Structure formats: C-alpha cells, structure tokens
C-alpha cells in the first residue's frame, strides 16, 4: 500500500480496536485508485488461439435416447448409425411438412418453430424424452450461393433451429451437441463459412439461461466428412470444453491469450472516414477520435434523419455539432446499414463531397431492452434486428466498398460473442458473425479487423449481463477511449482482437463452469456463515419467502440469508440469477423475466414478483395466498 498517498489526503490519528476476538473470516479489500490515475488498456488486448488438447481417457458411452438431426452430407446419418448400436436413436431430417414417428424418424422444416413443438410433444406422449441431442445440420460443406441465400439457410439450419429446440424442449436434463463445419481458422487455410458463426454464442447463452441444458459446439473442417465421426462420438460424453475443433486427427480447444507486445499508438488523420451508426454511443466516440486527428472528413450514417439544426434538444445533433467544433468536415446521411441501395448512395455522396473513402468503422447496431430477450421469449423479429445491423450490414459494406483501396475497415463487435450473457443470444450471434467475416475478408488480403469490446460505461442503464458488468467493474470508461482506440488502430495486423478489462480466459472458464448444468444435490456448495452486510438479518415470514431464501442459500452457499439482503452484495451474478429464476419456475410454476433479480434483488422484492405472477395465471391459486394485504417494499 502507498502510505504516502493515504496520509497526503488526511491526518493520521489513533483509533481504538474492538475488544472482541476476530472471527477469522476472509475478505477481499479492493485497491484504492487515486484520482487522475489510469488503468493500462494495452493489457486488455487478447487474441484467440487454438491449442491441442492433451490425450485423455475415452469417457464411458452414455445411455438413454439420442435425438440426431441428420444433414445431407451424411455425417449425421453416420453418427446415428454408430449410436444405434448401443442405445436408442431417433432421427430427424429436413422437409417441408412435419411428420414421422420414432421408428422411421421425423421430418420437419428447420424454420418452423411449430414443427419442433410437435416433435417434442410426440416424443413426450410416447414417453421417449431424449437425454442427448446431436445436431448435424451445419456439418455439410457450405454452398456457393449468393450471400442472402447463404445467410438465410445457415440461420434456419443453425441459429433458429437451436433457438426452437431450446424454446420447445421438454423438461429434464438435456445435453445438446451442435456439430458444424467451417466456423474457425484453426490451422490456417481451411474453407470458412462465416454465415454459420451465429450458432456458437447461442450455444453458450442457452446453457447460461437454462440450468437443465448443457450445450456445446463441435466444429469440423469442411472436408472432414465421415472421418470425423469417431471423434464426434467421443466428444458426446465429454463436458470439459464449450468449444472443440477437430482437425487432422487431433482435438483442439479454444483459448484466449493476452497480446504480449503492446501495440504502438496510432491515430489516423487527414482521411475520409465512413462511420455507420456514427452518432450512437460507440460510433460517436470513434468519430470523435477520428476527428481529433485533424482535417478529418467524416461520413456518418444512421437509420433516421437529423432534426433541424435549431433543435437543441437532439442529442444526435449536439454530437454532430461537437464533431464540427473539433475541426472535422461532417456529412450525415440517413441510411440503414443493411440496405445495399441506400449504402451505395452513401458511398456515392461521400465521393461527390470528399473524394474516395479511405477508412471505415462499422458501429451500427441495436442494443436496447426490446432486443435483449431471453431465449425462451426471443422472437424472430427481434433476432433479425440484430442480424440486420451486424450480419447484413457487414456483408453490404463488403459489397459497396469492393475495389476501394481502404486503409482500414473496423467492425465494432462485443465480448458477448465469446462470453454470451443473459438475454444476449441474438446480439452475441450477430457480433460473432462480424469476427468470422473479418477473418474471411482478411483471407482476401483486405484490411478488415473486428474488435470484441468489453462493456462500455456510457452512463445508460442496460439490462441483464450489461448491468452486472457495471457491478463487477468489467467496463471501459469513456475517459479511456482515446488511449484504447490508439492501441486498436496500431494493432490492425490482427483480423480479430478481444478487449477484456480482466484476463479473458479466466472469465470464459468461470462462465463455462458455472453455466455447465446445475450441480447435483450431493455436490451442493458447503454453506458459509452470513457475512457482514449493510442490512440487519430478517427471517422469512411466509412460505414464498422461505422457499426463495432456501433457493438463494443453496446456490450462493450462505446461511442464513435474510429477506432484505441484496443478492449481488451476497456475491450473486448473472449466471446465478439465471439459476435462481429457473428454480423459481420449478418451485412456483411462474416464469419471471431475466431482469427480475436486477430490479428486485432482495427476497422480499422477488416474493412480490412471484406472487403477482402466480395470481396473473388464468385460474391459478398461489400456494401461499395472502389475500388480506398486498405489501409493496421500496
């Protein structure tokens, strides 16, 4: 500790220590950050690396019913044939109309959510609930069709297929293995299918939101075909890694290493820069950085026109005027980044006004409470909003800028593409596409880079995992933006870089361990005494509060917990919140939104939510009826 910093601020004095004995409890003391000091953003840079997993004994074969989604390339059929030798197997194939039975197999349309509900309802009626689901619809080689067709087919057979499975699956434990080809550049030179990258983050989010599901991604090289089947079979019993790539007879696992050599600071200047979403939070921060280099010409886009310059209430207009005050020439064009015709118009207007575009920042996106939805409540419309900005927007940029001699094309992505997050299924998927697409563009010799940013502290209250990131300190402060951007523009040799304010691999492993299914009752954590809190212990008063307290105590490993103790002060976080809500659903037969614990972080608050939701069910009668009074705690 720096004692001189402490005593410079105050005069030392003698204090009396308590006479009672210390209780030998361990507490972490957070370091004091002096005013004016900076964290070191260059330590936040991470890159993905693939490492050969050490040989391990083959796990024992699993039993129970396996549901296998067979692809046209034959990988799924070979997997089903091999599994059928030791356990019951039900096959699912693609078709236009739903039909079939367990013996002959089922046929369903990948894009029809109702078909998945019919499939699981029929299996449940027959008493045949699967314990394993092996999904191979992404294992065949990617088609050479136009981008729009490829995006739609990959989404239907991958992202939306998994989404429908998670939304309609029967209760009980289920292990899902998504098998797909062409997602990762492991050895270098493999054919890439970036349109399939959206399924990976959804695997992680499904497992985080549903404690009854283990969901893993098994990735193949496109040419592997049937040679990969023995490896796939071996993976079905393993649970040690969320993502595995099978290459050349070896098993590779994904890791994230810090970038060892700090990037040289660099600030582009004197160019003409196109910034999509240029007046949004991150887009404006990057636009201001580019404008600060002197004599910059900025072409900014957004989905809606600007109000008249006399409208001083408009935040977007104030931001545009601020950029002009920095000395930049600014052209704003209302255009949707996913609209190819509109973006061609933007490029044409930029050339007419400023000349050729020399650099691009793609910061368009949709991140709000309406688009952050739990998997079970996610709609195709909300998911498509994310894909319009991130997926189609990136493809459109590649089309309209083809042949332009760019210095850089920077895609602003998110760590959710790696870590997931409650309610982030579609958002994380869209960001993952950007990373994969940048790698594919880099293969063509184009200077594309995707940056997975940690949560930004722009002063807005966000839902779910974003709000928890603010609590945990995993945030990038606005005053750190310029230094961070200088490092990013100095690291343009990387196709993809991840910015994490703490060691990324540790965060990934912690999230995977905590999301990898609920621990068996016999392995429940030992319960520690209630720590010193700001609240006085208050015991539960009724059955609802008693049940909630027991859920919290079992998951957090603390006893006793009072009804006015704060969930997050007790050490709770996003993944525990998901498990709490899953147990609430099991115990009370009510489904609360993912934000319930963030808005109601005390048992007394959550009990009110549970009771209100229970009474709202048609014909429902809560087990603990408190008809004589309604308590509202503030």
Image (cartoon, rainbow, N blue to C red):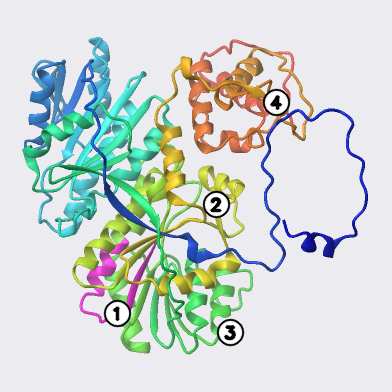
- Which x, y percent locates residue 634? 75, 34
Q: Under tag 4, what secondary structure? A: loop
In this rendering, the answer to whether 54 lies above or below 45 is above
Is there any visible trace of residue 333 in the rendered image? no
Give the mark, 1 or 3, whose residue is nearer the N terminus.
Answer: 3
Q: Which residue is mark 4?
A: 530
Give the mark, 2 or 3, whose residue is nearer the N terminus.
Answer: 3
| Separation (CA) of disc 2 from disc 3 | 32 Å
Q: Which residue is mark 2?
A: 474
Relative placement, left or right, of 483 versus 28 is left
Q: Determine the residue positioned at 51% across, 35% down.
A: 594
| Separation (CA) of disc 4 from disc 3 | 55 Å
Q: Which residue is mark 1?
A: 406
- Which x, y percent locates residue 318? 59, 74
Q: Determine the residue positioned at 49% across, 35% down.
A: 575
Give the mark, 4 or 1, whose residue is nearer the N terminus.
Answer: 1
- Which x, y percent locates residue 229? 11, 34
Q: What span is in magenta? A: 393-412
4 vs 2, front mark: 4
Mark 1 neighbour density, 10 Å: few (under 14) some (14–19) many (20 or more): some
Q: Under tag 3, what secondary structure? A: helix
Q: Which residue is mark 3?
A: 325
Mark 3 neighbour density, 10 Å: few (under 14) some (14–19) many (20 or more): few
Location of residue 518 by image quarter: top left
Q: Under tag 1, what secondary structure? A: loop
């Amino acid at each position: 500790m720096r004692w001189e910093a402490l005593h410079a601020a105050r005069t030392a004095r003698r204090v009396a220590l308590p006479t009672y004995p210390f209780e030998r409890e361990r507490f972490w003391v957070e370091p004091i950050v002096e005013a004016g000091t900076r964290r070191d953003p260059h330590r936040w840079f991470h890159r993905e690396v693939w490492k050969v997993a050490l040989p391990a004994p083959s796990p024992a074969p699993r039993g129970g019913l396996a549901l296998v989604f067979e692809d046209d390339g034959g990988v799924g059929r070979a997997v089903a044939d091999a599994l059928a030798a030791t356990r019951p197997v039900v096959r699912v194939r693609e078709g236009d109309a739903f039909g079939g039975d367990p013996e002959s197999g089922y046929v369903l349309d990948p894009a029809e959510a109702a078909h998945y509900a019919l499939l699981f309802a029929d299996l449940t009626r027959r008493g045949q609930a699967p314990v394993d689901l092996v999904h191979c619809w992404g294992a065949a080689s990617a088609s050479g069709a136009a981008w729009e067709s490829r995006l739609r087919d990959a989404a239907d057979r991958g992202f939306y297929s998994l989404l429908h499975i998670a939304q309609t699956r029967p209760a009980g434990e289920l292990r899902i293995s998504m098998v797909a080809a062409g997602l990762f550049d492991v050895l270098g030179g493999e054919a890439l299918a970036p349109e399939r990258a959206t399924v990976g983050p959804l695997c992680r989010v499904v497992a985080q939101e549903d404690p009854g599901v283990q969901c893993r991604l098994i990735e193949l090289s496109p040419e592997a075909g049937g040679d990969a089947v023995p490896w796939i079979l071996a993976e079905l019993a393993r649970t040690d890694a969320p993502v595995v790539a099978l290459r050349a007879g070896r098993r590779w696992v994904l890791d994230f290493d810090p970038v060892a050599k700090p990037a040289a600071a660099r600030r582009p200047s004197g160019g003409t820069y196109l910034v999509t979403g240029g007046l949004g939070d991150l887009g404006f921060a990057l636009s201001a950085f580019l404008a600060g280099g002197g004599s910059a010409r900025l072409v900014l886009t957004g989905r809606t026109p600007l109000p008249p310059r006399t409208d001083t209430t408009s935040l977007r207009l104030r931001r545009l005027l601020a950029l002009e005050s920095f000395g930049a020439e600014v052209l704003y064009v209302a255009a949707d980044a996913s609209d190819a015709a509109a973006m061609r118009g933007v490029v044409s207007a930029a050339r007419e006004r400023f000349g050729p575009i020399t650099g691009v920042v793609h910061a368009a996106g949709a991140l709000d409470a309406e688009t952050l939805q739990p998997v079970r409540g996610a709609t195709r419309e909300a998911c498509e909003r994310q894909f319009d900005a991130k997926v189609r927007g990136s493809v459109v940029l590649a089309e309209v800028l083809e042949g332009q001699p760019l210095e850089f094309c920077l895609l602003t992505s998110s760590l959710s593409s790696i870590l997931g997050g409650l309610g982030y299924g579609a958002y994380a998927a869209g960001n993952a596409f950007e990373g994969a697409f940048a790698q594919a563009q880099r293969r063509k010799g184009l200077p594309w880079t995707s940056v997975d940013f940690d949560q930004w502290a722009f002063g807005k209250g966000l839902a779910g995992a974003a709000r928890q990131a603010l609590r945990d300190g995993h945030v990038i402060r606005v005053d750190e933006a310029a230094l961070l951007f200088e490092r990013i523009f100095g690291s343009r040799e990387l196709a993809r870089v991840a910015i994490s304010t703490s060691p990324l691999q540790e965060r990934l492993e912690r999230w995977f361990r905590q999301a990898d299914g609920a621990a068996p009752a016999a392995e429940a954590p030992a319960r520690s005494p209630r720590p010193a809190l700001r609240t006085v212990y208050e015991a539960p008063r009724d059955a609802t509060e008693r049940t909630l307290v027991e859920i919290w105590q079992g998951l957090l490993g603390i006893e006793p917990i009072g009804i006015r103790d704060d969930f997050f002060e007790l050490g709770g976080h996003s993944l525990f919140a998901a498990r709490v809500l899953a147990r609430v659903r099991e115990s009370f037969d009510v489904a609360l939104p993912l934000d319930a614990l963030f808005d109601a972080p005390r048992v007394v608050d959550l009990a009110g939510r549970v009771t209100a939701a229970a009474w709202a069910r048609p014909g429902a009668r809560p087990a603990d009826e408190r008809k004589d009074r309604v308590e509202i705690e503030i």
